[in-house]
Image (tube, rainbow, N blue to C red):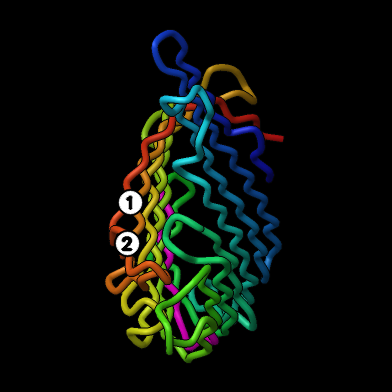
Amino acid sequence: RGLVGSEMCICDSGNSDESDYTAKFNAKRRMAKTRFELDYTGNISETQNDDGELNQTINNHRVRTNYNIYATRYFFYQPVFAEYYRDPFKNIDQKITLGAGVGYTIFDTGKYEWNVKGGPAYLGTKYISVLPGEEQRIDVAALVFSTDFEAEMTDTLDFTYNYGIQMASADAGGYTHNMVATIESEITGRLDLNISLTWDRISQPTRDDSGAEPEPDDYLMTVGITYTY
C-alpha cells in the first residue's frame, strides 16, 4: 500500500504574500509474518517581509522507517527502526535515531488496529550552532516508545493517530515527542481529502550561538489531497 501526494499549498497575495507547502509520503508492505513501513513528511512556509522578499518561517523534514517481524499473531519484534529529522528553526541541523525493540498489537479487527512498540536507541544530534564551550554534536542513548491507531469510522471516513516519544539527556533535547492525528474522507476510489493536526515538542531546546532559545512546542494543521495506489 502506498500513499503519495498529500500536499497543501496556501498562497495569499495582496498586501502580503505567504506560501505554505506540505508533502507526505507513506508506504507499507504487509506479509504474513513481516511488515515494513516508510514515512516522509516535509513542511515549508514562506512569508513576505517589508522589503518584498519571501523569508522562510518553517522548514522541517522527517523520515521514519521500521521493520517488524511477528513471532505470534500479536507479538512482534523490531530488528531495526530509524528516523531522520531536520528543523533549522529548532536549531537542529540533523537528528538521527537508530534502534531495535519489541511491539504488541493490542487488537486488529480489520476496521480497527492499535499497536504499541518501543526499545533502546542511539540518538545523534547535530545543532546549527551552540553557545561557546558547548558541543555542537551530541551522541547519546535514548529510549523510544510509539503507538499507532487506525479506525475505519465509516465506508468513506478513516481516522489515524500516531504518537512517538524519545527520552534522552538534556543536551540531546530531553523529552521529545511527535503526534499526528489525521482524518481522511474519500473523494473517489483513490483520492481522499486529508486533514491533519501535528504537535511537536522538545522539552529542553538548545540555544544557538546568539543565545536565542527555540520555542519547545510547534503546532501545525494541514489540509490536502492524498492519492493511494
Is the residue 67 above or below the residue 23 in the image? below
> Which circle's residue, 1 or 2, is located before the other in the chain?
2
In the rendered structure, the answer to whether residue 209 lies left or right of residue 125 reads left
* In the image: residue 53, left or right of residue 29: left
Query: Please, is residue 123 above or below residue 127 in the view?
Result: below
Contact, mark 1 vs mark 2 (Cβ under 8 Å): yes
Q: Which mark is residue 148?
A: none
Farthest residue to the front: give it.
Answer: 51
Region of the chain picked out in magenta, as a range: 112-122
Q: Residue at x 55, y 76 (%)?
A: 126
Residues at marks 1 and 2, CA–CA distance in whole angstroms: 6 Å
Q: Amino acid at mark 1?
A: Asp
Label annotation for residue 218? 1
Numbered tag placed on residue 201 in the rendering: 2
Majority secondary structure in the magenta region: strand
The residue at 47%/12% (across/down) is 13
Percent position of residue 64, x then y: 59, 62
Q: Is 68 in the magenta?
A: no
Please check the rendered image and state whether residue 117 is part of the magenta-colored stretch, yes or no: yes
Quadrant of residue 100 in the image? bottom right
Q: Nearer the viewer, residue 210 or 168?
A: 210
**Crowd class of label 2 (few under 14; some 14 to 19; many from 20; radius 10 Å):** some
Residue 151's spot in the image, x, y percent? Answer: 40, 44
Residue 150 sits above or below residue 164 on the image = above
Quadrant location of residue 68?
bottom right
What residue is drawn where x is 53% and y is 30%? 54
Residue 11 makes an appearance in the image: yes
Looking at the rendering, in which quadrant would you find the N terminus? top right
Residue nearest the viewer, comparing 178 with 119: 178
The residue type indicated by label 2 comes to Arg
Q: Could one spot residue 155 in this view of the protein?
A: no
Residue found 71% across the figure and 62% down from its top: 31
